[in-house]
Image (cartoon, helix red, strand yellow):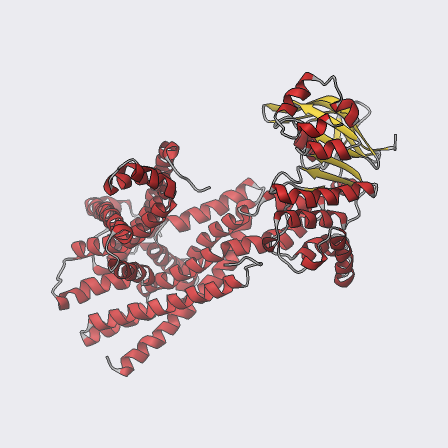
């Protein structure tokens, strides 16, 4: 494989990473909103939250991407396909992250909050000082997992015309008639990226050790 | 009337169809140690948690130093829920210690003890930490101030939990089975802290299986069975012969019956 | 933007066939993945030690790369090493090998969750290894791995949509074909999403049902 081709693949990897990173971060923000909605006292709001999560976990990402890509112009929003792709990925990951967050919050032992109650902390203070830090630490492994899933899922955005690593491999494979080395290289690059994320997550978990010896 | 730190009148509590407390009347005196004992399911923990307003009673009244807790009774006899602010003010006089310690895992011992001083009392960090160190010294753990709960033994964690409650200078301390989660060799350090607290004149209500501790430290013993207060009195009155048959039945399950017999 | 009823009815038989392809590739793929995954898990635990790193590499490969790339390698790259498959067999093979890696991890976690003492009791009573696995470990594990297993089934159902990339005539492929040719794309895509959604919810509920039936037999998360 020529250096030129490999550098094109590397560049496309960069697009894969940026695309995924943006979607994961936006998804994280959106997921806190969805999570809050699911826990809300208002029946309609919590139902809406749960319906959102159910739909975006129930339909395949590929179908969601196609749907959003074709729906946006109909709604009058003519955005570049990259934006449609990011919206699609974001909505999907937000649903999964909301579930992870919910699990994280539920894992905070009730007793810790009772102690805070007895010491006079308000619900608001309890949320930010006790629940959120502990829930976040509990959610970290799932978040890392989700990041890897999105990186792999980004391979599907080629269906709406966005060029990233998989699409680049496809295009190069059809022009050079060498699918094997090209797709194998693409796979290798994905592996490297995912391993990097896993390693970074491990390092991040270290700072949340709170004295626990491994 | 104001001589009583806590008064409990006609307290009943049900969890769904199960009634756990049946019209309990109890008066806790200031500066004394009252021990609640009884078999599992007798309602003693529930009674304590009602005093802390961690459970809301289904019927009856509780007052803390003369002020109603959570609910007060209207002239017509019905109960009215008090405003959250009022509840908080009354509750601030109570400190609580849990069976599971409930230390916050993401803060050091010092962090745990100083947290409420910073967040609730709005005291600046340096002063809050100074006050927290005073409390940690009192329970003998100033050397462990920088440790996380995961690095402390059960007995040490419980002592930090006591320091954390004491930091807010409560008038009454409630203990819900403080040593039940500890290995036997660690209970001593916690009981010693509680002993010195009692000697300093703190009003304490203790739910415990440590009958020996209750007999030696308790000014008053209250024996609950099936949600009813069966016996109330000094250790001599309660444990002295002839004993109530239910109490005998209960003590039979304890190896340190010997302690009670020495009273 | 009107819903063309005639379009739907005329395309009915084609859509039904496509649904059949989706369901059959999903179910056959899942079954194959389950069996293969179990074999891999057993091989890793009880097999010769040289197999372990090889199988571990296989699992990491399947989990670290996108399913799409694996499909492309198999379908477009396969002929270069003598594996020339039609879309459906390629899709089936790809799905099975992909799912097997995940199922093997699920089984592996299940095996490790069975208390050593239970296995030792079996050994002391003279049970053979096969008997221990089948009569002791599997029943105890079932409750524990059921949620993860059902979840994986659902994931595999959704992955069948990716098979459209190698022209397997399943639902997503068909609806894309019909839709883009007839300008009724958004509605049909939404309908497609709802079909998958419905199947996923059905699978979830069947999973909960199975869990409640099996609960008394075994281990569950502490």
> In the image, what residue occupies the spot 19% across and 44% down?
C13
Front-lying residue, C89 or B237? B237
Q: Position of residue A118 (x, y in %)?
A: 71, 44
Q: Is residue B130 left or right of residue A158?
A: right
Q: Residue furthest bottom?
A: A3
> In the image, what residue occupies the spot 13% across and 62% down?
C83
Is residue C65 visible to us here?
yes
Q: Quadrant of residue B130?
A: bottom right
Q: Position of residue B83 (x, y in %)?
A: 75, 39
Q: Compared with residue C22, is residue C163 higher up or lower down, i.e. above or below?
A: below
Is residue A122 visible to us here?
no
Q: Position of residue C123 (x, y in %)?
A: 30, 40
Q: Compared with residue C74, is residue B44 higher up or lower down, i.e. above or below?
A: above
Q: Quadrant of residue B191?
A: top right
> In the image, what residue occupies the spot 88% across and 29% down?
B1
Front-lying residue, B104 or C4? B104
Q: Is residue B253 left or right of residue B80?
A: left
Q: Position of residue C210 (x, y in %)?
A: 34, 35
Q: Quadrant of residue A179?
A: bottom left
Q: Compared with residue B157, is residue B54 higher up or lower down, i.e. above or below?
A: above
């Amino acid at each position: 494989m020529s250096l030129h081709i490999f550098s094109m693949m590397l560049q496309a990897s960069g697009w894969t990473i940026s695309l995924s990173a943006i979607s994961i971060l936006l998804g994280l923000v959106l997921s806190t909103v969805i999570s809050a909605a699911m826990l809300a006292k208002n029946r309609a709001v919590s139902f809406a939250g749960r319906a959102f999560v159910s739909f975006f976990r129930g339909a395949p990402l590929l179908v969601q991407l196609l749907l959003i890509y074709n729906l946006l112009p109909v709604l009058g929003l003519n955005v570049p396909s990259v934006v449609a792709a990011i919206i699609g990925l974001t909505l999907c990951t937000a649903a999964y992250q909301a579930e992870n967050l919910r699990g994280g919050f539920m894992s905070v032992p009730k007793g810790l909050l009772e102690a805070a109650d007895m010491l006079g902390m308000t619900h608001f203070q309890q949320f930010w000082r006790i629940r959120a830090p502990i829930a976040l630490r509990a959610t970290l492994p799932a978040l890392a997992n989700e990041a890897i899933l999105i990186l792999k899922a980004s391979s599907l955005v080629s269906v709406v015309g966005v060029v990233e690593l998989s699409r680049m491999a496809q295009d190069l494979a059809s022009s050079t008639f060498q699918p094997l080395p090209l797709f194998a290289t693409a796979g290798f690059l994905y592996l490297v990226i995912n391993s990097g994320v896993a390693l970074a997550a491990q390092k991040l978990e270290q700072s949340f050790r709170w004295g626990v010896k491994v | 009337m104001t001589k009583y730190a806590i008064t409990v009148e006609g307290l009943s509590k049900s969890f769904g169809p199960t009634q756990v407390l049946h019209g309990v009347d109890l008066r806790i005196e200031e500066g004394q140690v009252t021990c609640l004992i009884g078999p599992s399911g007798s309602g003693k923990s529930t009674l304590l948690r009602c005093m802390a307003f961690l459970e809301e009673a289904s019927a009856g009244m509780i007052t803390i130093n003369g002020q109603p807790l959570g609910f007060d009774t209207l002239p017509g006899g019905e109960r009215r829920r008090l405003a959250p602010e009022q509840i908080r003010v009354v509750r601030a006089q109570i400190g609580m210690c849990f069976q599971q310690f409930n230390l916050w895992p993401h803060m050091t011992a010092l962090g745990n003890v100083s947290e409420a001083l910073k967040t609730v009392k709005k005291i600046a960090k340096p002063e809050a930490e100074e006050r927290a160190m005073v409390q940690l010294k009192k329970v003998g753990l100033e050397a462990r101030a920088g440790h996380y709960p995961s690095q402390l033994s059960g007995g040490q964690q419980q002592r930090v939990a006591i320091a954390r409650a004491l930091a807010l200078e409560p008038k009454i301390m409630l203990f819900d089975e403080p040593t039940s989660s500890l290995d036997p060799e660690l209970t001593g350090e916690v009981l010693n802290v509680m002993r010195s607290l009692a000697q300093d004149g703190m009003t304490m209500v203790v739910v415990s299986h440590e009958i020996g501790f209750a007999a030696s430290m308790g000014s008053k013993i209250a024996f609950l069975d099936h949600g009813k207060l069966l016996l109330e009195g000094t250790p001599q009155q309660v444990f002295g012969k002839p004993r109530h048959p239910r109490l005998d039945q209960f003590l039979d399950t304890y190896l340190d019956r010997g302690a009670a017999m020495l009273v | 933007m009107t819903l063309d009823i005639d379009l739907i009815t005329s395309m009915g038989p084609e859509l039904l066939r496509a649904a059949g392809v989706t369901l059959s590739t999903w179910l056959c793929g899942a079954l194959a993945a389950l069996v293969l995954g179990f074999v891999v898990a057993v091989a890793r635990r009880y097999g010769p030690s040289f197999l372990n790193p090889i199988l571990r590499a296989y699992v990491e490969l399947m989990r670290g790369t996108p399913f799409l790339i694996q499909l492309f390698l198999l379908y477009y790259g396969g002929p270069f090493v003598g594996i020339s498959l039609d879309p459906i067999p390629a899709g089936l093979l790809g799905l099975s090998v992909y799912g097997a890696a995940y199922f093997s991890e699920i089984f592996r976690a299940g095996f490790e969750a069975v208390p050593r003492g239970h296995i030792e009791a079996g050994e002391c009573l003279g049970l053979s290894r096969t008997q221990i696995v089948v009569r002791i470990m599997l029943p105890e594990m079932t409750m524990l791995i059921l949620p993860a297993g059902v979840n994986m089934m659902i994931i595999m159902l959704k992955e069948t949509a990716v098979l459209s990339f190698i022209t397997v005539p399943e639902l997503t492929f068909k609806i894309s074909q019909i839709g883009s040719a007839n300008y009724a794309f958004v509605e049909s895509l939404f309908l497609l999403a709802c079909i998958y959604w419905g199947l996923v919810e059905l699978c979830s509920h069947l999973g909960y049902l199975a869990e409640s039936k099996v609960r008394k037999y075994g281990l569950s998360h502490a």
